[in-house]
Image: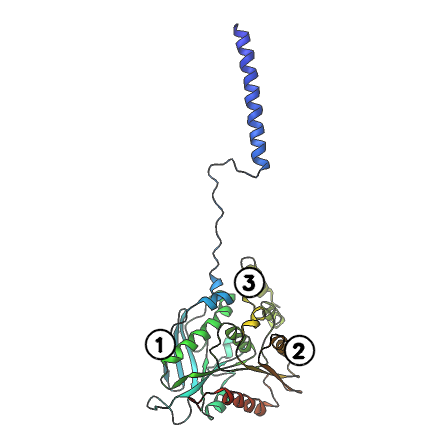
Amino acid sequence: MTMKAVYLMLKKKMKQYFLLFCLFVIGMLIGGLSLSPLSSAPTTIPRPLLKYSFDGLKQSVFTPKAISLTDGQFTFDTQEGLVSGTANIPVGYGSSSKQKCPVIIMLRGYVDKEIYKPGIGTQRAAEFFAGNGFITLAPDFLGFGSSDPEPENEIESRLIKPATVLQLLASISNLQVADTGNIFLWGHSNGGQIGLSVLAVTNKFKAATFWAPVSKPFPYSILYYTDDSDDHGKYLRKVIADFESIYDPELFSPTNYLDRIETPLIVHQGTGDEAVPWKWSMDLISNLQSLKKDAVLYQYPGADHNLTPGWNSVVKTDLKLFRKFTSPSGL
């Protein structure tokens, strides 16, 4: 074979190899494969806030932690830090008393930190209930009162509150004067939303009462109030958008878990409320009743967000509820 023939044969072979190589590359590109040996597996995005989802809270174990009571104030430990609060103990009961009292956990509504004082939003009703034989415990929540700082993440600082209440519920067993067989829940406004979330996680409360609860889905329950902020909600909308880029908000919305509520509850709503539309409470009770839940709505014509006028009637109705469900070991 001459040199020219060898050259022509090699040239033909090179064309064939080059054509095969091109076809291989095109096939890999069409198949979405990578030619780079340095390509890595997709990274998993961390989602630490899932522990505050309803399934996350349901799976969490809240073991009793230290709780102390001194001069009308109490503190208790949580996984995220120390939380303070205001306590009211019925006259004649204390550390030396052998008789135990039923307990009401009281959850306030939203209050600006600049004007916050322990007991704000709960103290008047708490004194009434304590005067009728109930211990009241109103947590300040992280970042308020003498509590440790709240999480820097704006969404986490909101989602953490039901977990705080669940930890307080578990820790009441360390409060000597408390009758742990008779524990009730009271909430006002945003405290009502926290309360609904707690009831969707546990059935350990004997009964619950909510005053003008915020009962719309998350995060609409936040967005509804953004017009009240100085920036008309620009910051919060950005925070929520960032949250929704990672998490499914449906996992954190109490309206999706009303079927899990087993605790008897009543809702009080004033028709003159300018903070929580009265229709919200009507929708809430309608949804609960459609699920065959023990839920009752009391409406007060012209009453405002604090149920005024009508406050005296409201607390007496609550007291009647608490007494109805207090077992013989209590009152």
234 lies above or below 285 = above
Label 2 sits on what residue type? Lys
User: In what element is the residue under mark 2?
Assistant: helix
User: In what element is the residue under mark 1?
Assistant: loop
Q: Tag 3: Cα neighbours inside 10 Å, few (<14), some, or many (≥20)? A: some
Q: Residue 297 placed where, x, y %?
A: 62, 83
Residue pointed to by mark 1: 66
- Residue at 42% from the left image edge and 74% from the top image edge: 167
Q: Which is nearer the N-term, disc 1 or disc 3?
A: 1
User: In what element is the residue under mark 3?
Assistant: helix
Which mark is drawn over residue 239?
Answer: 3
Looking at the picture, tell me which residue is in the foreground, 86 or 30: 30
130 lies above or below 194 = below
- Residue at 58% from the left image edge and 24% from the top image edge: 19
How far apart marks 1 and 3 lie (CA) works out to 34 Å
Q: Can residue 110 be seen in this view?
A: no
Label 1 sits on what residue type? Ala
Left or right of 226: which side holds 184? left
Residue pointed to by mark 2: 279
Which mark is drawn over residue 293?
Answer: none
Q: Residue 289 placed where, x, y %?
A: 62, 77
Q: Quadrant of residue 65?
A: bottom left
